[in-house]
Amino acid sequence: MTTTIAAIRGMHDILPERISTWQRIEDAARQVLAGYGYAEIRTPIVEITDLFKRSIGEVTDIVEKEMYSFTDRNGDSLSLRPEGTASCVRAVIENGLLNQPLRLWYRGPMFRHERPQRGRYRQFHQIGVEVFGLDGPDIDLEVILLTARLWRTLGLTGLRLEVNSLGDTQERAAYREQLVDYLEGHRTHLDADSQRRLTTNPLRVLDSKSPETQAITAAAPRLMDSLGEETRAHFAAILAGLEAVGIAYRINPRLVRGLDYYNRTVFEWITDDLGAQGTVCAGGRYDGLVAQLGGRDTPAVGFALGIERLVELVEAAGTVAAPPLDAYLVAVGEQAQREAPVLAERLRDAAPGLRLMTHCGGGSFKSQFKRADKSGARYALVIGDTELARGVIGIKPLREETGQRELTLAEAAELLTAASPRA
Ligand code: HAM
């Protein structure tokens, strides 16, 4: 027997039964983002590996152990994108788009070789936003507000907002020294990963999951206390804006994010309903990245949300129903089968947006009607020799106990248009 080939571990097919939730999320995001004036950008899925090393950071989990990197036929090291920010920054520099403020969004697959578990995949999908050229707290607030609007649009109520400020480069460097001094005194009690990070990326020790390390970091100096006046004012203005709009938040001093490019504002939307992988959306400011990648000095802020995680939440909230078919066309007899596609095209012309499935593959009236019923359509349209001879279509409601009627094409189109939820 020939063996079958399975999908790669951590990479999934999105089957038709789930697709309406995906589309619902994508449509809601598109609608909300358009409402704030954001324009879509699409970038390649593969980039030069150095782009990610230089932006996400050499000593981050993503770059150290999670990238899908390979050498292409030219000998270049390429990687499947693990996230969208770096590609976006590359694209706006390369295409000379930075001469005015830019509000962009994107969506698509991202790739990280993580250990798969619920909510964590090796191919996953993000919808992300990146704003360039604006440095005030008003834009940080805007990107958070639009995520809150998206949750409302999707009927999600259980998400919590956590925020923090990481300070600017100097503030963080000064804090880093204090933190390292403190942690060095407790080195032997830190978990192995944190001991290693002490020299490479000490801020990440703050979000260690080890209870022992957490007990040590609980008493560590706080980054918030090292922030200068300007950074504090920036952060305070965002918090005041959230309060004015009525969005609840919690300041989480441990929130440091796993990518190196952030400064000042960072935020995450978290849920308790997804087990260990509770972060649905995350982002923040990254004012240094554009210059770091060779562009002119440009402030920036953005976020990305994980679509798979949102899909789970939206499904659990039970707010999505698959859009039903309006009609299923049954054609009995040779002549009717030849006529069916012609009639279906005329109906689609006459009733734009109509969801009409045509029976294919022939069969008896009974078997075709069974399919019509199973399709979930509201109406069965029937043509056979009699209908053809009289120039009418038989129309039978499938979800109510009413008999079959005969209508002309124009009448049928009118009825289906009126019955369609989009009409
Ligand atoms: P991130 O925190 O790495 O940030 O990812 C953002 C979101 O993508 C996460 O909160 C999560 O919902 C989802 N996600 C990440 N990894 C996985 C995975 N393995 N499986 C399923 N979902 C996952 C970024 O990617 C930044 N680029 C966000 C950003 C944009 N910051 C500024 N602009």
Image (tube, helix red, strand yellow):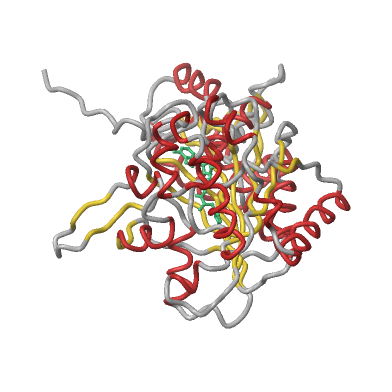
Residue pictured at 30% horizontal, 59% vertical:
49
Looking at the image, which residue sits at the far left? 1
In the image, residue 164 sits, relative to residue 172, either above or below, namely: above
Q: Looking at the image, which is closer to me, 293 or 110?
A: 293
Q: Looking at the image, which is closer to me, 265 or 101?
A: 265
Does the image show residue 401? Answer: yes
Residue 405 percent location from the top left of the image: 67, 28
Q: Looking at the image, which is closer to me, 298 or 254?
A: 254
Does the image show residue 384? Answer: no
Residue pictured at 37% horizontal, 28% vertical:
362
Residue pictured at 62% horizontal, 74% vertical:
133
Q: Quadrant of the N terminus?
A: top left
- Residue 299 sits in which quadrant? bottom right
Please give the count of numbered marks on the rendered protein: 0
In the image, residue 267 sits, relative to residue 219, either above or below, namely: below
Using residue 274 as the reference point, say whether residue 3 is left or right of it: left
Looking at the image, which residue sits at the far front? 185
Residue 294 percent location from the top left of the image: 42, 76
Residue pictured at 83% horizontal, 56% vertical:
241
In the image, residue 405 sits, relative to residue 132, either above or below, namely: above
Residue 380 percent location from the top left of the image: 58, 28
Looking at the image, which residue sits at the far right? 244
In the image, residue 170 sits, relative to residue 1, either above or below, namely: below
Residue 318 percent location from the top left of the image: 67, 26
Q: Looking at the image, which is closer to me, 293 or 260?
A: 260
